Amino acid sequence: MSNEPGGRYPPIMEKVQKHRVLRLASTVGFVVFLCLLVIDLGDWLVNAENGSGEAPDSIFRAFQGRQSGVIVMLAYFRSQFPFLMATLVMLTLFFRAKRICHTESFREQVDCRIKRMMMVSDGTRTPTELDVPDRKAKIATLIVTALASLIFFRLVVCVVDPLYVNEFQYFVWTFPAGYFLVIQVAIIVADSVILPLYLWLFFITIKTVKVVRMYNIMIQSFTGSTLNQCGLVPEIDTNKREDDLQSLCLTENLVAGLLHRVDQSFRTLTGFFLLGNILQLASVISQGFMSYHSSQSNVLTKPIGLVLYVMSCIGPFAAIYAIVMFSAAVHDQRMTSIRLWKELALAHNDEKQLSEKHEYFSNRQLHESGLGKRLLTIMHVTSHRCRGLTVAGTVYITKSFGITLIMGAVGFLCFMLERSEHYDADKAGRPHSPVLLRERYDHFPSTI
């Protein structure tokens, strides 16, 4: 058994190659969102401080002498973060489209092969029993639907409560008031195009967990059929044991290859998903602190503003939680596989020690003398293979990783509380500085 499962991707037996359609769509999306990102950054550079009634000046003037520069910077880039995440995701999707489609095809093949193996080894099982619906699929659909509802509510607010009644300056152009809705919709679209990719990631992790779970059942069945609690099973078909072990080794290669390909296909996308949502959540929190300390427009005192602010915090947090939850489930199932192999190897060693006391097993020891070494080798190789999804290939996404993110969010809130005092001092020392650069759509309620 090789330590790094690989090999060529199996051919896709579909007439229409999905990866070409996916690559074309990602190309169009990348060009569109990159243009929007560049234009939005250009507007921030050109019209940086128009909101204060002063002439446009260097954007670095907004940060000079400020001890709360982090809060200001995160709040100012509120509209750029969705464009940035959408651009990076589309670029990654362009390069990973073929691999992702091949991974999905390979997963279906592994799923069918494991089901056939389980039905052969246990004649009482039927395909219907192996296709138990997973409630996590419904949870994933519900989460994505809730995120879509939040985005739709933002769109309704933008249409019903327009921000500008006069013409406005955007980048190097001057637009009538009604055209500002187009800018708001563009930001909402940048958030919306990510939702199908969330659902795709959730479903592939759910199906991968199902495959690994069936593999774990095979290990448990092999252990139960060959070892009893005392380690004495006088009626054992050694040939059947060898066949079952060979089948398990083949299944281990398939499962390890599937996990490796899923990680290779989605590791970069997962990293950008987490990074983008963390930045958006930090930006919303920063805007909340700046709005709370603002005498010009404290939207947190308005019911609709408070509701929008809470929903803006819930959206990125729910996305981060769902990504960690579904990805960690793959890691948990894989760790269960490693634990079962360890238990099997230890149980065989106990059986070998007990067999030395019984005459019946003297003839079997020569035949099974290498079984213990094989089990230890399989256990060692399994523990060093891919265990689940990673963040850009750096760290596995586990429950402890999710707890680390939560603790980081708590630390960021404490940092914001401490820096908010300096923000008051900065604002008092600079009465002509705007509360928010480009506050027309970086502020609430326009782009929440």
Image (spheres, rainbow, N blue to C red):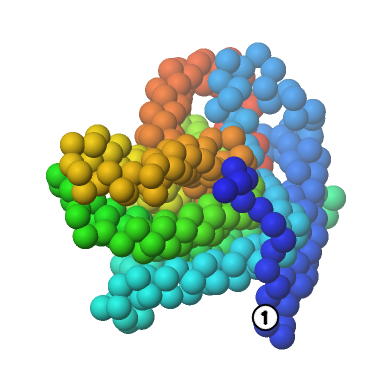
**Residue at the farthest right position:** 172
Q: x and y percent of residue 326 in the render?
A: 42, 53
Q: x and y percent of residue 230 in the render?
A: 14, 44
**Residue 408, above or below 4:** above
Q: Residue at x 19, y 55 (%)?
A: 234
Q: Residues within 10 Å of mark 1 (few under 14, many from 20)?
A: few
Q: Label 1 amino acid?
A: Met
Q: Residue at x 61, y 63 (%)?
A: 103
Does residue 271 appear in this view? Answer: no
Does residue 27 appear in this view? Answer: yes
Q: x and y percent of residue 157 in the render?
A: 48, 63
Tell me: 268 left or right of 395: right
Tell me: 173 left or right of 348: right
Q: Who is closer to the viewer here, 227 or 271?
A: 227
Q: Who is closer to the viewer here, 99 or 224?
A: 224
Residue that label 1 marks: 13
**Residue 9, above or below 128:** above
